Amino acid sequence: MGAQAGNDSEDGSNEIPAEEQNGDESQEIIEETYSGVMTGEGVMVSEPGSLVELGYGLEEDGGRLLPMVAALHLVRRGVLQVTDDGKDVVFEDILNHGLRSDPSFFLKYLVYRDMRSRGRKIRAGLSDNPYLWFYEKPGKPCSHLVAIYSRNQNIPLSDLEEILITGGRYKKGVYLALVDEEGEVSYYEIKRFNTRPSMETVMDRTDVAQLVGPMTVVWNTEGAVSLYREGYFGKPIGIRKPRSMDFERPITLSYNESIYLAEKGRIKIEGGEGEVVSERLRELAAGERNFMERSLVYGMLKDSGFVVKSGMKFGVDFAVYEYGPGLDHAPFLIHVFRQGSGITPTEIVRAGRLAASVKKKFIVARTDCETGKIGMLSFSRVKP
């Protein structure tokens, strides 16, 4: 067992470490102090006492090995004294040691401290493991890996895919801990978003759509109603929210809808010079942001039976329904990125908070037009 906590002050009371004076560590009580020795991988504590049941460190011959992040936290709390070749090691020494091998070391400390201060069990790995390990329930195995990023980092979407692969290998979920410049931490869970299997669509008629700038119009009201009934294609002109499918209005179709329907043989697009083929429509839309990628995602979602509408009012590419407007609220907001793109923590937080405020799930689609591959990741704000 370690010695009893705290040195006695002149008035006979125990000194309270500075971190505890703020009440930050009130959820975790450590009633002992410990002594440890610096090693290449961390700090070895020969008599770990309650550190074992509190989930600190890794079992090693001769005691408990505390990874540097855990040692930094305990030194800061005033419950761990560290020596190296007989000399005292202070907080700054451990911090600088960690930063030399890992530039994100201080971010890990902030997240580790945040979790511990709220009574959550989290472990730090050794130098070859870049993640923290979060335990959702006491006495149960680790439930999530925690990957940490600073506010202004550009996170390659391929990196997030790799983290999910690693989590899957260990059968763990994945949290992102996003740290701002004031040390505040926001947590998001990321998962793969899987669509339904593709469905065969039978088109039994062909209607004419006229090219009118950035959209097409089906003027024939019978054809317009038929398209809307078949998959909520288009929007009736002059009706903001159709309450039935019996309107007698023409409909406007986006370029994505027009190309999809033209390639299915469902519509024939006409312009000032006669018929407009889908390739020409793609050329006209080429100036739009990520149009080819968005067209690919739109087609995949429609083939899977989803209803896909514009997501502009939510600041994303698509609002996606499982059944259709009026039957359900769009549960998914999807934003499309090119292969090789990245996303910043600020973008994740902004989109995630918006999605949460309207009770929707924020999804990123990463597309490769050369291979036709689409990877989809969902982000949900959590409080571990």
Image: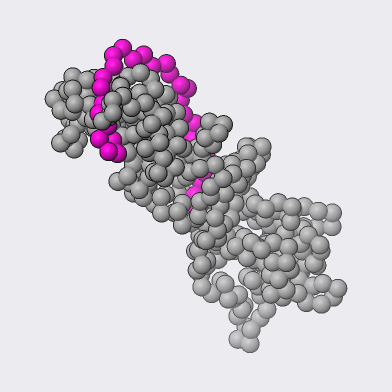
Pick the front one: 236 or 268:
268
**159 with respect to 381 (left or right):** right
The question of residue 204 being in magenta is answered with yes
**356 with respect to 102 (left or right):** left
Q: How many marks?
A: 0
Compared to residue 309, the image places residue 380 above or below, namely: below
Residue at x 39% of width, y 43% of height: 288
Rendered location of residue 173, percent (x, y): 57, 42
Pick the front one: 87 or 299:
299
Quarter where residue 111 is shown: bottom right
Residue at x 58% of width, y 55% of height: 148
Rendered location of residue 118, percent (x, y): 52, 59
Q: Quadrant of the N terminus?
A: bottom right
Query: Which contiguous range is marked in magenta?
Result: 187-215
Rendered location of residue 334, percent (x, y): 41, 40
Residue 81 visible from this viewpoint: no
Quarter where residue 177 is shown: bottom right
